[in-house]
Image: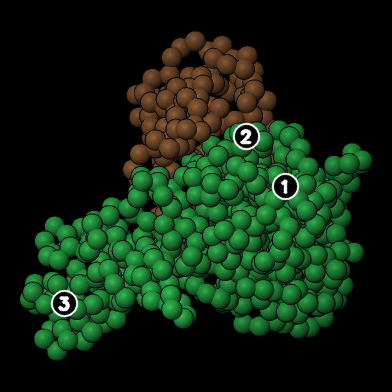
Amino acid sequence: MNTASPTTTRRDLLSLIGAVAGGSAMYLAMNSLGHAQESDYRGPVRLEGDPKGASVLVLGAGVAGMVAALELRKAGYRVQVLDYNDRAGGRTWSLRGGDRYTELGGETQECRFSPGLYLNPGPWRIPYHHRGMLDYCKRLGVALEPFVQVNHNAFLHSKAAFGGQPQRYRTIQADFHGTVSSLLAQAVSGDRLDDAVSAGDREVLMAALRSFGGLGANNSYTSGIEASMRRGWDKPPGGGLSAEPVSSVVHSASDVLQSRLWRALAVALDYDYQTTLFQPVGGMDMIAKAFAREVGDLIRLNTKVTAIQQDEHGVSASWMDTRSGESGQARADWCLCTIPLSVLSQIEMNVGLAMSAAIAAVPYAPGMKIGLQFRRRFWEQDDAIYGGISYTDLPISQIGYPNSGYFQDGPGVLLGAYPFGPYAYEFTAMAPAERIRRAVAFGAAIHPQYAAEFEHGMAVGWHRVPGAMGCYGQWTDAARAQHYRNLCALDGRILLAGEHASYIPAWQEGALLSSLDAITRLHQRVMAG
Amino acid sequence: MRVVVAILLLSASGGAAQAQAVAPAGGVFGSPFRFTETNGASIYQSVCAGCHMADGRGAVGAGVYPALAHDPRLEVAPYPIALVLHGQRAMPPFARYLSDQQIADVVGFIRQSFGNAYAEPVLVGDVQAAR
């Protein structure tokens, strides 16, 4: 099992192509769902001209609602904002020691994280091409630091591969690239791809495969210095008398392919996850706090919208104060509604059939995050993992290491679970303490230190978040074709915005761009008189 | 993005020996692609209870997860079958995650639990017809 297969059978090649094609097909599928679209942010929005005292009621104080409030007030509008939560930010949210969080069903968790440590239950990273978010962070003074998306020393783990032993990302990457390159090189040199590769390209392709795969003599991928330069050493090069390195032993082609650990390598190929990514220093809610410094005076918190009615003169929202029980009405000439569709679809609102059908057509995906505090940063001290993500096929799916506070002696909080799909539903249906217990038990398969070092955790299942009732709007191509434009179009005096009204679902950039687009159209309408 | 990416990462193989160590009976966490719980009660507790709660009382936040307890709308089985399959508003569709048998089982369970007592069985064919 120490060397890649020296001879390539037709079956090897077919299975290899199948594996690679699977990845491409997945990428295409993602693309068609709008997951790899570029941000079309073109700099600060310009709302020129005097709106002559026109007023806008903004519903929801997340990124979409607060950026609208900021820009509309700046343009001369009278603005008021209502939000259900007891804090501004919506899904832009962080949990820290001293916070209390009560989920639907009534379970309350007390966060006991140590000072400076936090969990971002919602968004946690901002890619370099989310230009709108980065620009507002810069303008609002939100300090950013790198979010480590790829850590070559983090783990890839499958319960069925390599006896359940986690493998370092770099070894799987090196062995997968080496295996693929070696198989292809043998096919090319054996004249088996003559129909596909011209004689002129063949030499270049061989050079490319040797470079890409780290191939040695005979174009094979074998244990030795060449491979160890990529996958790491059994004993790394040193200094002095004991300096001589000892090469590591590559996995066999079959073991690498069958492990399916290569699936995780494709994540970093996705446009959304290409470096550089960023995170706010101190927690994602630094963005919420920065917006709230600008527009907090416009926001009424703890305010549940119960009905939205428009007539030829304006829009009224009926509300109830969730603490006092007091009820009232807010009225303005126009309404920008950023309430998640999971909630909005249940609120009485007199819009046309087209918008109404669009609002009802987008179910909300599950999502679940668990933050775990450990007594010490053993992933750094014992495993030399500084930030980044380990991937596993266990239900926790991912372990995200903190991308700040490196080398500190005290405790650390890592992201102990971040599944989607059935696993996220199943975690959400458990009581918070049970979710945390499971996450600690699963994670111990990757980090045995869990058992001795675990202190406490916080678990957030997005279908149980009272103000969101789901993680993000889960569009299908069919639903988009039928409803997307109707969702975004002005209906009388009501416009919608939020990540659900974008082609960048689940990302803050989608919320931001949809809001800027909506208020630009609204302003044009107002100026047209 | 993330659902697709997550599925990309996860092995389709059901070799769950290690997971079984911390998984209870009823098949929770059997697959990243579909629910593997095998009877109405366990499907309800592993999936539906996330929103409708373990005792079927639902929940109220910014919106509502309807209570299933004492729910006269459950009398006509095609209604809950269609909701589970195709979703509606805050209710996600489960057609891709649950088999016809599982949907028949869980709808049957709900119709006979939480103070509901609709005795006629829910047939797999009813689900097939609505899919």
For residue A168, side relative to residue A434 (left or right): left
- Same subunit, labels 1 and 3: the answer reads yes
Residue type, mark 1 in image? Gly
- Give the spatial CA distance, label 1 vs label 3: 61 Å
- CB contact under 8 Å: marks 1 and 3: no
- Give the spatial CA distance, label 1 vs label 2: 23 Å
Vertical position of residue A358 compared to residue A192: above or below? above
Q: Image point 41% across, 57% down: which residue?
A: A167
Numbered disc 2: secondary structure? helix
Which residue occupies the foreground of this view, B101 or A255? A255
| Crowd rating for badge 3 (residues with CA inside 10 Å; few <14, some 14–19, many 20+) | few
- Give the spatial CA distance, label 2 vs label 3: 54 Å
Residue type, mark 3 in image? Asn
Q: Image point 67% across, 30% down: which residue?
A: B58
Q: Is residue A261 visible?
A: yes
Give the label, 1 or 2, closer to the camera.
2
Query: Residue A526 location, x and y as percent?
Result: 75, 73
Q: Is residue A490 visible?
A: no
Residue under pointer 2:
A434
Which residue occupies the foreground of this view, A181 or A162? A162
Residue under pointer 1:
A467
Residue under pointer 3:
A218
Vertical position of residue A228 compared to residue B91: above or below? below
Chain identifier of the residue bearing label 1 in the image? A
Numbered disc 1: secondary structure? loop
- Per the rendering, the colour in which chain A appears is green
Q: Image point 20% across, 81% down: which residue?
A: A206
Looking at the figure, which quarter contains the N terminus of chain A? bottom left
Query: Residue A499 location, x and y as percent?
Result: 61, 60
Chain identifier of the residue bearing label 2 in the image? A
- Same subunit, labels 1 and 2: the answer reads yes
Q: Quadrant of residue A336?
A: bottom right
